[in-house]
């Protein structure tokens, strides 16, 4: 049992401090979020603004998707040379969806670019119901055969390979996949080098080991082989072009193969000996 001296009753000052603390706590409770009208009004205005924007956007989307602005015509501004009218009509029927505002121009453009001869397409809207179409077609300059697979495609002026059918009289290129641009550049170089012969280069081949082979319009095949540090292929071909007129007159026979892989000369195979020469090289 505690001693009587340890008992201290609450004084008026203690009661006053407790009452002050309690009053202060009740005052802070009354100052919460729901007791701040200005803040509540601001939050309400912001929410109403967002709701109005969302409703307005939904209304605009709904209005533009209505059949009020139908597309009636696709105008081709660049007359096609290889692409047919039937192909263009088919893409227009299958790829164009929606009205003047909702049609996806990128989807339509991609659909036209899938046509065999189309290199690039551009699609624009023209008020009130027209789509304008501009086409850039491939301009084929050669046939291209991938040496690995044997698949035949076409090469355009930019050295790009594309899949299409053609009956045009063009040179034939072949080489590893991805080398079409390099082969095309070499074709122009080699064509200029053999021009003194009065012959046309009709085929150019690059093997996987980077060996070159040319075919002229008279049927003669020129084997250049690989580029050598001491005697590059350009030097060997130039030497052959200079020596060929006199050599041809002295031979008096038609040559089927000219092998230029030798550092100081070249070997010739007459037409009748082509099979035997080919078998010996194997």
Image: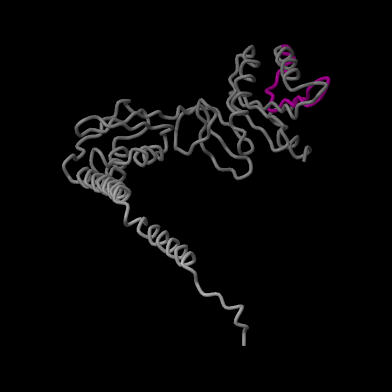
What percent of the width, then of the height, locates residue 268?
75, 25
What percent of the width, then of the height, locates residue 51?
27, 49
Query: As drawn, which residue projects farthest toward the front?
Result: 5
Query: As drawn, which residue projects farthest toward the bottom?
Result: 1
Residue 258 shown in magenta: yes
Residue plotted at (75% across, 19% down)? 236
Residue 45 shown in magenta: no
Q: Which is nearer the eye, 228 or 96?
A: 96
Q: Which is nearer the eye, 63 or 97?
A: 63
Query: On the rendered image, what quadrant is the N terminus found in?
Result: bottom right
Q: Which is nearer the eye, 34 or 123?
A: 34
Query: On the rendered image, what quadrant is the C terminus found in?
Result: top right
Residue plotted at (22% across, 35% down)? 73
Residue plotted at (36% across, 28% down)? 81
Q: Is residue 43 above or below residue 155?
A: below
Q: Quadrant of residue 210?
A: top right
Query: As drawn, which residue projects farthest toward the left?
Result: 68
Q: Is residue 213 left or right of residue 13?
A: right
What percent of the width, then of the height, locates residue 13?
48, 64
Q: Which is nearer the eye, 209 or 33?
A: 33
What percent of the width, then of the height, locates residue 78?
32, 25
Q: How is the image coloured?
A: one colour
Q: Is residue 168 left or right of residue 44?
A: right
Q: Is residue 236 above or below residue 168?
A: above
Image mark count: 0
Q: Is residue 245 above or below residue 109?
A: above
Part of the protein shown in magenta: 246-268
Residue plotted at (45% across, 27% down)? 139
């Amino acid at each position: 049992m505690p001693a009587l001296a340890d008992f201290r009753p609450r004084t008026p000052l203690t009661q006053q401090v407790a009452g002050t603390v309690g009053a202060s706590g009740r005052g802070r409770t009354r100052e919460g979020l729901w007791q701040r009208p200005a803040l509540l009004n601001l939050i309400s205005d912001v929410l109403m603004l967002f709701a109005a924007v969302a409703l307005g956007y939904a209304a605009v989307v709904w209005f533009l998707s209505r059949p009020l602005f139908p597309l009636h015509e696709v105008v081709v501004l660049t007359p096609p040379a290889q692409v047919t009218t039937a192909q263009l009509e088919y893409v227009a029927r299958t790829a164009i969806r929606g009205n003047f505002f909702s049609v996806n121009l990128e989807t339509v453009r991609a659909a036209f670019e899938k046509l065999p001869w189309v290199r690039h397409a551009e699609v624009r809207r023209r008020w009130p119901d027209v789509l304008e179409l501009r086409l850039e077609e491939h301009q084929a300059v050669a046939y291209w055969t991938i040496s690995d697979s044997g698949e035949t495609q076409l090469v355009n002026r930019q050295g790009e390979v594309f899949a299409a059918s053609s009956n045009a009289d063009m040179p034939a290129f072949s080489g590893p996949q991805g080398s079409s641009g390099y082969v095309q550049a070499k074709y122009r170089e080699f064509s200029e080098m053999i021009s003194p012969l009065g012959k046309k280069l009709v085929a150019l081949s690059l093997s996987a080991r980077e060996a070159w082979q040319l075919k002229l319009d008279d049927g003669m095949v020129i084997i250049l082989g690989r580029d050598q540090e001491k005697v590059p292929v350009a030097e060997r071909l130039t030497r052959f072009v200079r020596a060929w007129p006199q050599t041809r007159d002295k031979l008096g026979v038609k040559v089927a193969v000219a092998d230029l892989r030798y550092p100081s000369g070249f070997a010739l195979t007459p037409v009748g000996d082509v099979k035997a020469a080919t078998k010996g090289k194997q």
